[in-house]
Image: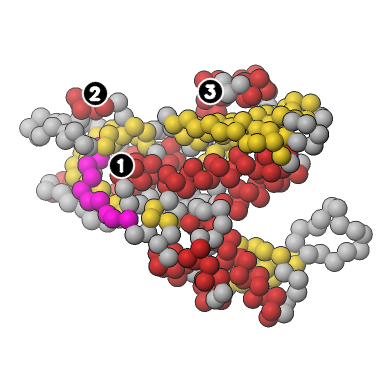
Amino acid sequence: MPVKTPHHPFICLLAAIFWMVAAVPARAATVTGLYEARVPVVDQSSSARTAALQQALAVVLVKVTGARSVPGPLSAALGDAAHYMQQYRYEQAPPDPNAQSGAAPALLLWARFDPRVVNEAVSAAHAPLWGAERPRTLVWLALQDSTGARILPATDSSFLMQALTAAADQRGIVLLFPQMDPVDRAAIGVPDVAGFSADRIRQASQRYKPDAVLMGSITPFGAGQYAAHWQLITGTQQETWVTPPGDEVVTVVDGVQVSADRYAARYAIATDAGDIAGVSLVVQGVTSLDIYAKVLSYLSGLTPVRAVHVQRMAEGSAYFSVDAHGSLDNLQAALTLGGLLAPADTAIATATSAPAGTTSIPAQTLLYRYVPGP
């Protein structure tokens, strides 16, 4: 990681930080297994394996590009899926409670593909690339059906929960669900979720520390049909949409699919995008070596960031110059993932962060603050 500093005492500080960075736990929503997939396979023959590897690669390409299906220019890669594969194995699928007695367990093929080779194919196809840092999304889902009105809890094991988690796995995003324990029930009810009571939901969501909050209201609409209203809150952004009447599972899953679409549009980086260099970044609240190490490690690990140049520390603020791939919007969106950093109050930061004898902060500087946490 490039570092610039004119002061010898600061060099000693940085040396200590570098020893600490490796041990600092990340708070970013890092998704694992982006380049892995499990798909059903009829048997262990070479022809069945070839078909399953193609399906598995398609699953991976959907996750890493942020698209709902494999982008057209990448379709040719599916025909040579073995070229991208690192390893594979066969597994027995978990028991199906609905299977007939005595039926043989289903067979799965697990495959892991080479991230470097896959990324090169994505780049060659000029498709976007979505890194592993993704919003942890807390889902408040109000359901009204034949069993009554309720909020879907984390302990639910119904077919709707299975559909939601399967859709999230398919798109490579992390979903959280409320416990709906006495704390949650005292804070929020079905009318709050169905009515998008944003303030109450934000307050009730704080205990889960999500990066984003998805609210959904699923209501009957004729025989066997359901409609949905959704609101996605990411930072200060609020987006709403309506799912037209349809099958209950399809209606519920639409909340995950559209959320993933919105995330990909914000966080995925076009592989032929230009680079930006020398972006000034000031982080307030850096009052200890431990905090400095956390911030430095976090910045260095973000997908858009190519290099972090340390400038100085002064009056509880850390000054950086950041080189990044993609747009300034890509960088700003990534900075707040995981909750380690939040936008700072511009007026306060501008007034307090320039120490005596130094120049003032340029107007285009990105101003953030460290958010204490585990």
- The residue located at (71%, 46%) in the rendering is 162
Main SS class of the magenta portion in the image: strand
Q: Is residue 301 visible?
A: no
Asked if the residue under mark 3 is in contact with the one under mark 1, i.e. CB atoms within 8 Å, the reply is no
Q: Is residue 53 visible?
A: yes
Q: First in sequence, mark 2 or 1: give its number.
A: 1
The residue range painted magenta reads 273-282
- The residue located at (61%, 21%) in the rendering is 195
Q: Which residue is mark 2?
A: 347
Q: Residue 164's quadrant in the figure?
A: top right
Residue 357 on image: x %, y %: 7, 32
Q: Nearer the viewer, residue 48 or 104?
A: 48
Asked if the residue under mark 3 is in contact with the one under mark 2, i.e. CB atoms within 8 Å, the reply is no
> Regarding mark 3 in the picture, which secondary structure is present there?
helix
Instruction: Describe residue 3's horizontal placement relative to residue 173 as left or right.
Output: left
Magenta region includes residue 160: no
> Regarding mark 2 in the picture, which secondary structure is present there?
helix
- The residue located at (15%, 49%) in the rendering is 5
Q: Which residue is mark 1?
A: 292
Q: First in sequence, mark 1 or 3: give its number.
A: 3
Q: Residues within 10 Å of mark 3 (few under 14, many from 20)?
A: some
Q: First in sequence, mark 2 or 3: give its number.
A: 3
Give amino acid for label 3.
Answer: Ala
Q: In the image, is residue 107 above or below residue 299?
A: below
Of discs 1 and 3, which sits in the foreground? 3
Instruction: Describe residue 63's horizontal placement relative to residue 301 as left or right.
Output: right
In three-dimensional space, the C-alpha distance between marks 2 and 3, rounded to whole angstroms, equals: 27 Å
Instruction: Describe residue 101's horizontal placement relative to residue 157 as left or right.
Output: right
Q: In the image, is residue 350 above or below residue 134?
A: above
Give amino acid for label 1.
Answer: Tyr
- Disc tally is 3
Q: Which mark is residue 198?
A: 3
